[in-house]
Amino acid sequence: MCGIVAYTGKQPAREPLVEGLKRLEYRGYDSSGIAILTSPPYWVRTVGKVDALERRVWQDSPAGTVGIAHTRWATHGKPSEANAHPHIDCTGKVYLAHNGIIENYLLLKKRLASSGHSFRSETDTEVLAHLIESLYQGNLEAAVQRALLQVQGTFGLAVLHAAHPDEIIVARRGSPIVLGVGVGECFAASDASALARHTDQVVYLEDNEVARLEPGRFSITTLDNRAVSREATTLEAGAGAIERGPYEHFMLKEIFEQPEAVENALRGRINHAEGVAKLGGLESVEERLQQARHLIVVSCGTSYYAGLFARYAFETLTDLTVETELASEFRYRKLNLRQNTVVLAISQSGETADTLAALREAKRKGATVLGLVNVVGSTIARETHAGVYSHAGIEVGVASTKSFVSQIIILTLMALLIGRNRDISYEEGARLLEGLENLPDQIRETLQQSGHIRELAQKYCGFSHFLYIGRKYQYPIALEGALKLKEIAYIHAEGYAAGEMKHGPIALVDPAFPTMAIAPEDGSYEKMMSNVQEIRARDGHVIAITTAGNAKLEHLVDDVIEVPRNHDLLMPALTVVPLQLFAYHCAVLRGCDVDKPRNLAKSVTVE
Ligand code: G6P
C-alpha cells in the first residue's frame, strides 16, 4: 500500500528519496512522485514502476537537500500523473504526500472550492494541501496541526513548504510513520526498511502526533500542540536486509527460507524438561491466560487462514472455546464478549487497518488483547497487552509465505503453553515439541521437490479454474493454497472444506476443472479418499498431496506430491510448502509479476 519517504539533511535529497521508494516497492503501488525544495521546487510524478521516476530524477538531477516522495496505491481516483502524490496547493508552495483516507474530503473540498481553491486531481489527499494553505500564517507545523483537527479519517503524512527550506512536517493517525535520526540529517518513512540503510536510530510516531524534522533533529507535538518527549530507539539488526540473493524472486527466496523461519520461531521457546513452550512475551499476562475461557482470533488474508488453523490447534490442545473471525467483520459486530475472553490479533506487518481496528474494539470492550506479529515495533505490536513475535525476518513478496509457516508454529507453541497448564500431558507435550523440532529438516526435504512441482505447474498452468480441498487441519491449508494461486498466478481457485464439496462445487467438476486434494494420512484421510473418488467419477483431474510412502494413491489420482510424516497437527507446515511452490511456478510460467501482483499490496493500511 502507499509508501512515504522524507529527507532533510546535507546531501542531495534525490538519492535517499528514490532509494527509499525502491525499498517500499514491495508494498504494492501503481504510481509514484517526488518533490524537492529547489527554486522553484522540483516536482515530478509518473505512472507505473519507480524506475520511470528514477530515470526522470537522474536526468534532471535536482540539487535540493530537502524533499518528500511517495508510492501510491489508488483508492480515490485512478492511477494517473494528476492523481499521484505529492499534491500541491494553489500557490505551488505546499507539497504533501499522504497514506490513508480522508473520509470527510467531499465536505472539505466543497468548502474550499467555494472560497476560491481550485483542484487538479480526483483524490481525497489534495484537499489537505489546500486546507493547510488556507490555515498557513507563517508557521507550517501550526497550519498542519489545525488542518488535521478538521480531518476525519486516517493519515500518515509528510508536508513541505517552499518558505521553510530545511523543514519537513510529518503526522500520523492510523497509518504508520517512523522517523530516522542521523548525523546532520533526518528521515521519515511509512516503513523502517526505507531508512534502515542510513540510520538505526528510529522514533515511532503515535496516533494524533505531529513531528517537525530538521537536519539532525526533531520535535514531536500532539495535534493540540502539547509537546511530546520521546527518545530514539535502536532498530533491530537486519531490518534493512532486503536483498534477493541468487533467487529469481523474493517469493521464492522466502519459500526457501522457511526452514530457518521455523528454527527462529522455535529458538529459546522450548522447555524439554517440562514438555512445554516458553514464550517470554506472554509472561506478563500469565494469570489472565490461566483464567481465560474463550479465545477469539482476528486477522486478514493469509493471517486469517493462520487464524483458522489456530482454532483447530487451540481446540486440540486446550479446553478453550475458540472463534476465528475476519478482522473486517469483527470490528463491526456487536460484541457480546464473555468474561475471561482473550482476543488474539495475527498480522505479519502489524499495520493492517482492519486488524488494528478490531483489536482496539476488543480492548475497548475489556478483553485481554494479544498479538502475533512479525514486524518488530509495529503498531499492533505496540497496542496489544502482550504478544509474541514471529521472527520470520522481513518478508518482501506480497504473497505471504514464510510468515504463515512461522505463525502456525507459534500458534502451536501458544496452544501448548496454555494446554499444558490444563489437561495436556507431559508425553503429549514432548511429542509435539519433537515434531516441531523435526520440521525444519522436513521442510528442507519438501523443498527439494521444487523441480517436480515445476513440471506439474507446466502441465496444469493453462487451466483457468482450480478446486482446493482439505479437512480439519488441512482445511485452512486448502484455503491458503487457493489464495496463493489467485494472488500471484491470477488463476481462479476455490478453497473448500472437502465435506462441503457435495453442497455446491462438485457441480463445477469436469475435465477442465482440476482439484488439488490435500490428503496426508491423518485422521481425515479415508474421508478425503471418498471425496477424491467422487471427483474422479466425474472425470476431474486430481493432484494429491500426501505423506511419503503412501503407495495407495498413485493409481487413484493423476499426480502425487509427497511430504514427510509428522504429528497430524503439524502437517500443515509441510503440506503448504508444495502449494506455495505450485502457485509460484504457475505464476512464473504465465509471465506474472510474482513479487508485485496486480492490484495487491503487502501492507493494507486502509480499510
Ligand atoms: C495483504 C497481503 C497478504 C496478507 C494480508 C494481511 O492482503 O497481501 O499477504 O496476508 O494483507 O496482512 P498482515 O500483515 O496483517 O498479515
Image (cartoon, rainbow, N blue to C red):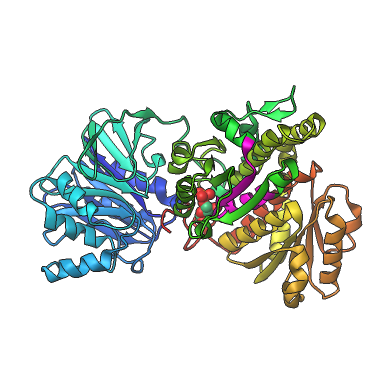
Range shown magenta: 291-311
Q: Is residue 398 visible?
A: no
Foreground: 241 or 314? 314
Percent of width and height locating residue 157: 28, 50
Percent of width and height locating residue 199: 35, 31
Q: Is residue 283 above or below residue 357?
A: above
Queried whether the magenta region covers residue 301, the answer comes back as yes
Percent of width and height locating residue 70: 32, 52
Outermost residue to the top: 273
Queried whether the magenta region covers residue 184, the answer comes back as no
Q: Dividing the picture into quarters, in which one does residue 23 lie? A: top left
Q: Quadrant of the C terminus?
A: bottom left
Q: Dividing the picture into quarters, in which one does residue 411 lie? A: top right
Q: Is residue 536 visible?
A: yes
Q: Dividing the picture into quarters, in which one does residue 558 lie? A: bottom right
- Taking the spot 66% from the left edge, 57% from the top edge, the residue there is 481
Question: Residue 82 vs residue 175: left or right?
Answer: left
Q: Is residue 249 above or below residue 371?
A: below
- Taking the spot 48% from the left edge, 48% from the top edge, the residue there is 365
Question: Residue 570 vs residue 216: left or right?
Answer: right
Question: Residue 588 vs residue 145: left or right?
Answer: right
- Taking the spot 65% from the left edge, 37% from the top edge, the residue there is 414
Outermost residue to the front: 339
Foreground: 523 or 159? 523
